[in-house]
Image (cartoon, grey):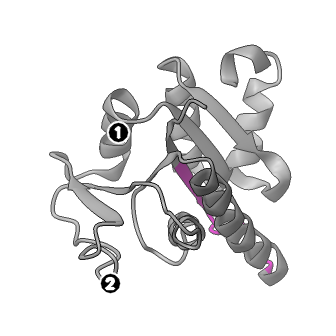
Amino acid sequence: MTTLRVLVVGSIRATNDPQQRDLIHKAGEELGKRLAERGHTVLVGSEDPEDVDADVVRGALSVAKPPPIEVHLMQGAKECYARVVPTGQVKNRPHRYRDWDVTVLEVLRHDADAVIALGGRVGVVQTGVAAWMLGRAVLPIAAFDGGGMTIWGYSSGERSEFY
């Protein structure tokens, strides 16, 4: 089985509905678990509770043998997941730019084979479209509105190029 380096982007920021937010968090955790079960390297960018990143990491760490998990940080950002970094399960990777939007483009160019997008807003849309333009596989999850749904709409006429 081929394993990939998968960047997961998304957040609960596009909705104020508590039930929808809860579903996004649950989906992020399930996604992390499924990626880990298949041995894919998980790439994220924060541990902010508004982002799906922490949920994805929690899901990935819930399996018996977690895959590599990388946190790609913009320059100057504090390290994330301090409790699991010493165990070697999570590696923080600082980047050279002080802007997350530029940092994520660098991650797409050099580190990610694929992108999964759920929820979120404009940053998620920019990441998904940039990934597509760089020839990466993009899987937008439209069930939660926001950026994932916007990318889904953009991909409607280009499905074979997205994933």
**Does the stretch in magenta take in 13?**
yes
- Which residue is drawn at the image coordinates 62% and 47% (left, top)? 38
Q: Quadrant of residue 85?
A: bottom left
Instruction: Indicate the position of residue 107 as horizontal and vertical percent values.
Output: 35, 39
- Which residue is drawn at the image coordinates 80% and 47% (left, top)? 142
Question: Can the viewer see residue 16?
Answer: no
Q: Earlier in the sequence, mark 2 or mark 1?
A: 2
Please give the range of residues in magenta. 8-17
Which numbered dot is residue 88?
none
Mark 1 secondary-structure assignment: helix
What residue is shown with label 2? 83
Establish if 143 lies above or below 89: above
Establish if 18 lies above or below 36: below
Instruction: Indicate the position of residue 150 as horizontal and vertical percent values.
Output: 73, 41
- Which residue is drawn at the image coordinates 81% and 16% (left, top)? 157
Magenta: main secondary structure equals: loop
Q: Quadrant of residue 160?
A: top right
Q: Quadrant of the N terminus?
A: top right
Crowd around label 1: few <14 · some 14–19 · many ≥20 (10 Å)? some
Question: What is the CA distance from the residue labelled 2 to the residue labelled 1?
Answer: 24 Å
Front residue of 89 and 109: 89
Q: Amino acid at mark 2?
A: Arg
